[in-house]
Image: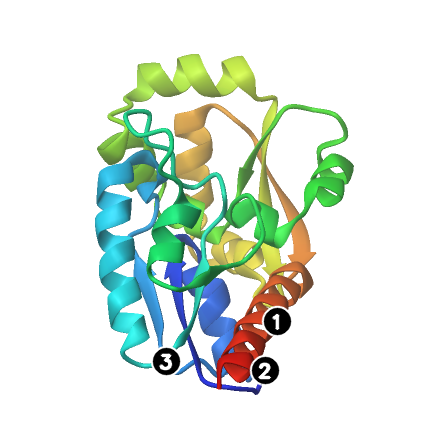
Amino acid sequence: MTGDSYSIVACGILRRELTFLRESGFLHADRILYTGPGLHTKPDELEKQLRRQLAHARRSAENVIVVYGSKCYLDSNQPNKTIDSIISEAGARRVQAEGCIDMLCDADCRRELSGGDSVLWLSPGWIEHWRRIWQQYLGWDAADANMNFPGFYRRAVFLDPQPLGVFDDWVANTPEKILEFSDWSRLPVENRPVTLDRLKGLLRKTISEGAGEQGTER
């Protein structure tokens, strides 16, 4: 996607998808900077890393796009502070989605794929970093997983971005990536291919809006 200069700050959960979009020629960002994956569980660290990466991104381009969702930051001690208030202080713009899963599969898509079941949604980044998120950050052990996952969810659905084909590659070459999470969570993991059209549309809209504002200012 060509246009005025811009940089991106994103959650590390989406590194694989954004790398593909850049390498395939869709994104022409001056820089793509990442915060650590799974920091929605550690709001203080998320804010620290987000502010640092926003400052770095602004050194490369005035138009800075943040690939985080509205529900990715919650500080119970400061309920008035939101991810948008942090981003607006840096003069950046955020893609309009609830979270990374919503960026790959919107509400209608999730209703269709879930079939009305209570589903744990996964993407490549969630599987790659599940130990960090649930064990390291949240401190869950096998007993916590057994109590929380089967108690709330009937199954896990893996959103497999196409044409990346991550699930099939893992099944063929590193099946333990899927099996270890399934064993630990006590949930069957089902593969559901999705396109990157939703993410591309969100990025296109936000990048264009930021470029338009710069043009007005100039």
Q: Residues within 10 Å of mark 3 (few under 14, many from 20)?
A: some
Dot 1 or dot 2, earlier in sequence:
2
Q: Position of residue 62 (x, y in %)?
A: 38, 77
The single residue placed furthest to the front in the displayed view is 217
Q: In this rendering, does residue 202 appear at all?
A: yes
Disc 1 and disc 2 in contact, CB within 8 angstroms? yes
Tell me the CA gap for discs 2 and 3. 16 Å
Q: How far apart are marks 1 and 3 (CA)?
A: 17 Å
Task: Describe the element under mark 2 as helix, strand or loop.
Answer: loop
Q: In which quarter of the image is residue 168?
A: bottom right
The residue wearing badge 3 is: 61
Answer with the quarter of the image where residue 56 lies.
Answer: bottom left
Work out whether mark 1 precedes mark 3 in sequence or the reverse, and give the earlier one.
3
Location of mark 2 (residue): 1
Count of numbered tags: 3
Q: In this view, does 147 lie to the left or right of 214?
A: left
Identify the residue shown where x is 39% and y is 83%.
30
User: In front here: 99 or 143?
Assistant: 99
| Residue 81 image point, x, y percent | 35, 38
